[in-house]
Amino acid sequence: MNEKTGMPDTQECTYTDTGYIVVNAFTAQGAIPIEGALVTIIGDDHCGNGVYATARTNKNGLTPKIPLPAPTPDSTGLSDNAKPYALYCIEVDKEGYYSQTKISVAVFGGVTSIQPAELSPLTL
């Protein structure tokens, strides 16, 4: 475990900052939070595609704040191709609901983002 980022050492990453994601799982157009949904965050760019974190939503449908490697906000001027954000894939699963996958979710250094995830119930 990397002491600075708290992320697994198996991920080779040059990001020097940390951004945060909170996933908000719900159904019925936001009227009903989904407790116990499993959220998996996977790398989606040059830092690799391994699993960075997993978490479960609470009774309000929210995960805890999840730290993720991200570029330092002022490092974008280093290269014409540099992005000011890191990309991640977020998978949200709950028994009785269709799973949802969010691809290329941007995470900025020093910023906490809330990612909505509306799950639809399975029909019988």
Image (cartoon, helix red, strand yellow):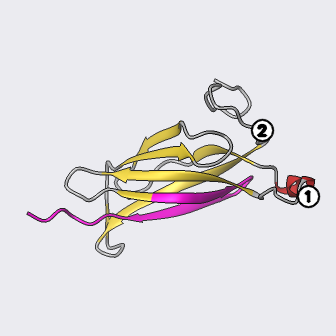
Quarter of the image for the C terminus: give it: bottom left
**Residue 25: x percent and y percent?**
38, 60
Is 43 situated above or below 117? Answer: above
Question: Is 39 on the left or on the right of 28, as rendered?
Answer: right
Give 106 or 65, whichever is nearer the viewer: 106
Where disc 2 sits, the SS reads loop
* Dominant SS type (magenta): strand
Q: Marks 2 and 1, Cα distance to the nearest angstrom?
A: 15 Å
Name which residue type carries label 2. Answer: Thr
Give 10 or 72, whichever is nearer the viewer: 10
Q: Which residue sits at x=32%, y=56%?
A: 99
Where disc 1 sits, the SS reads helix
Q: Is residue 58 visible?
A: no
**Boundaries of the magenta span:** 102-124
Quadrant for residue 46, please give it: top right
- Residue where numbered disc 1 is placed: 77
Q: Which residue sits at x=62%, y=51%?
A: 20
Name which residue type carries label 1. Answer: Gly
Question: Is 100 on the left or on the right of 66, as rendered?
Answer: left
**Label placed on residue 3:** none
Give 30 or 87, whichever is nearer the viewer: 87
Quarter of the image for the N terminus: give it: top right
**Residue 112: x percent and y percent?**
64, 57
Q: Which residue is situated farthest in the front direction here?
A: 81
Is 57 situated above or below 29? Answer: above
Circle nearer the N terminus (2, 1)? 2
Q: Which residue sits at x=70%, y=34%?
A: 5
**Label placed on residue 14:** 2
Is 19 situated above or below 12? Answer: below
Is 111 situated above or below 7? Answer: below
Residue 109: say if magenta.
Answer: yes
